[in-house]
């Protein structure tokens, strides 16, 4: 009787390889974009074979998606948690919009979070068939939940107007994390990260006014 074929297991001696690949690939994608980054570039940078990349992720598209959803999915989940807490506490528009921006503030002060946000900003400039799909998976649920809560607070606001204003807030947060806001140039002595945090702080405190 033929013995069943043994399926490949986790490569020996590579216990940290997967996380290293994710980290290095994230930074390469952020610098060179999706099209400009290859499995070969990633494998050479990490010091592993293309076969190992394929073993862990299957394809470049799946690797890119996992990097995005690994943190963007957490942002969406954090927003839903904050929204539930604000709703339970009877919070109004200021609290709703503050809870929408707050997760980004928490991320940008960490090295890993800042690196991811650079990667996410690069995704925004990718072809729509790539970027829209990722954003849909990571953010649509929380964005629709916020839109529903905002319209409950402002029932006279049309659905179109509500989503358009949310899009403006999202656009402002993306600009803040893009490292191209120039606030550090306009205000000499203010570091780039400090400038990013200042913009996010202003949004946290004042974005609700756009929905009045």
Image: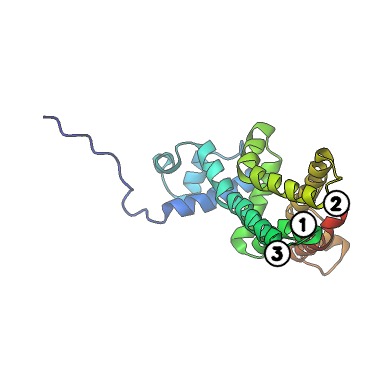
Examine the rendered structure and indicate whether residue 160 appears above or below residue 27: above
User: Which residue, given by chain and number where applicable, does mark 2 sit on?
Assistant: 211
Residue 80: quadrant of the picture? bottom right
Earlier sequence position, callout 3 versus callout 1? 3
Image x and y of residue 65, in percent: 56, 42
Please report whichever mark, 2 or 1, sits nearer to the chain's N-terminal start: 1
Name the residue carrying label 1: 97
Residue sticking out furthest to the left: 1
Answer with left or right where residue 52 lies relative to residue 143. left
Residue at x-position 44% and y-position 37%: 58
- Local secondary structure at mark 2: helix
Q: Furthest residue to the bottom?
A: 189
In the depicted structure, whether residue 140 falls above or below residue 206: above
Residue depth check, mark 2 versus mark 3: number of the one nearer the observer: 3
Horizontal side of residue 198 vs 143, given as left or right: right
Q: Is residue 31 visible?
A: no
Does residue 123 appear in the picture of this structure? yes
Residue 81 appears left or right of 190: left
Tell me the tag on residue 137.
Answer: none
Q: Report crowding for label 2: few under 14, some 14 to 19, many 20 or more residues within 10 A (C-alpha).
A: some
């Amino acid at each position: 009787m033929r013995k069943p074929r043994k399926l490949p297991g986790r490569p020996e001696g590579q216990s940290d390889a997967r996380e290293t690949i994710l980290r290095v690939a994230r930074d390469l994608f952020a610098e060179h974009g999706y099209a400009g980054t290859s499995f070969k570039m990633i494998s050479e940078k990490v010091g592993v074979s293309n076969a190992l990349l394929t073993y862990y992720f299957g394809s470049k598209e799946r690797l890119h998606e996992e990097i995005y959803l690994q943190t963007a999915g957490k942002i969406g989940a954090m927003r839903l948690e904050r929204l539930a807490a604000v709703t339970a506490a009877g919070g109004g528009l200021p609290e709703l919009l503050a809870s929408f921006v707050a997760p980004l503030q928490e991320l940008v002060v960490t090295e890993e979070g800042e690196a991811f946000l650079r990667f996410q900003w690069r995704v925004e400039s990718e072809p729509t068939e790539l970027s829209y799909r990722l954003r849909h998976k990571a953010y649509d649920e929380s964005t629709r939940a916020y839109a529903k809560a905002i319209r409950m607070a402002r029932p006279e606001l049309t659905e179109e107007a509500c989503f358009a204003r949310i899009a403006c807030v999202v656009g402002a947060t993306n600009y803040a994390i893009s490292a191209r806001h120039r606030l550090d140039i306009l205000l000499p002595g203010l570091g780039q990260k400090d400038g990013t945090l200042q913009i996010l702080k202003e949004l946290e405190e004042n974005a609700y006014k756009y929905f009045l």
